[in-house]
Image (cartoon, rainbow, N blue to C red):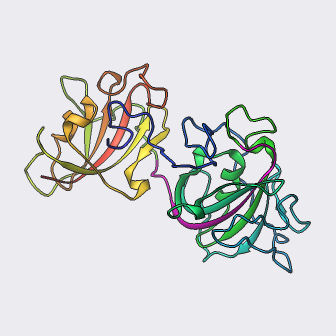
Amino acid sequence: MGQFAFARARASSFILASSALVACAKAPPPAAEPAPSGAEATASEPSHAEPRERPAAAQDGSSSAPPDVATPPAHAGRSASGVAWVVLHHGAGGDAAGPDARVLVHYTGWTREGEMFDSSRQRSGPMMLPLDRTVPGFREGVAAMTKGEKRRIWIPAELAYGDAPQQEGAPSGQLTFDVELFDILIPPATPEDVAAPSAGATVTPSGLAYRVLRAGTSTDHPTDGSRITVHYSAWTKDGRLFDSSVQRGQPFSFTTSQVIPGWAEGIQLMTVGSVYRFWIPAELAYGDKPRYSSMPAGQLTFDVELIGFE
């Protein structure tokens, strides 16, 4: 079915196939619930982080552990939380990813004993990961990286899955990752009026509220039978971004029968090229107590751009 915010019975939008980085269900596990909160990604690259002789990088696609897999070298950078790292290859510069970005990466992970437990390089290609859904140590380490950078990261057990993971298949103890960062997708800014409709918003008889952020380029509206393509970002009432096609870089196509009632109503108000902000009450979304724990509860706020329909 469609993306997270809209499918009536979808369990999660963050389907990360075979990723051991996200809160575990199996080895390597997909994301089910947000990773537990941990150290913030505040580490910056210290002047001593680059060794005179860089450590050997594991071969692309190889399961062989690097020689320093068990212990960070003396010249490694270290954060206050205990995450250690060395830069294997400098990036092209620019801003670091930050803790809330989605990142396109290749990675390989080993236990302290040198056993590889997961590698995107042994699958079809790089993976897009939402950093706020990864284990705290991985989030912190990758948040400080720039595009094109390759980094080795040592994550203490308490910022990974612990010494005795509760979830089946999760690797235990200190974990070591080689990560290559290809791209960074920054989350859209939270609207100032995310919590409630702003002055001048229109409220329909159903309780749906909306405001036109940009007028469209036509007079035609989609209908129940239309195949509709949009870009969107979605927040809970407290300002938490829970889904965004903009951040994924991939428009979403659907029909009105596939989406929540507030969407089915609101989309038909729009014309091609327009951008609307919708405040959807709980009864037109997933309710105050959604059927699935991964679904957002209460009022939801969406910024939607209508790209086209047929």
Magenta region: 171-189
- Left or right? Give the position of 91 relative to 192: right
Residue 105 lies in the magenta-colored region: no
At a point 60% along the width and 73% down the height, the residue shown is 148
Q: How many numbered discs?
A: 0
At a point 66% along the width and 51% down the height, the residue shown is 139
Observer-nearest of 88 and 58: 58
Q: Position of residue 226 (x, y in %)?
A: 13, 45
The quadrant in which residue 3 appears is: top left
Q: Is residue 37 above or below residue 84?
A: above
Q: Position of residue 255 (x, y in %)?
A: 20, 42
Q: Is residue 275 above or below residue 287?
A: below
At a point 77% along the width and 43% down the height, the residue shown is 172
At a point 76% along the width and 66% down the height, the residue shown is 45
Q: Is residue 132 above or below residue 6?
A: below
Quadrant in which the N terminus is drawn: top left
Question: Hey, which residue is sitting farthest bottom in the picture?
Answer: 52
Residue 176 lies in the magenta-colored region: yes
Q: Is residue 262 above or below residue 126?
A: above
Query: Can I make out residue 272 in this image?
Result: yes
Question: Hey, which residue is sitting farthest top in the picture?
Answer: 289
Q: Position of residue 161 (x, y in %)?
A: 73, 40
Query: Can I make out residue 201 in this image?
Result: no
Question: Hey, which residue is sitting farthest right in the picture?
Answer: 74
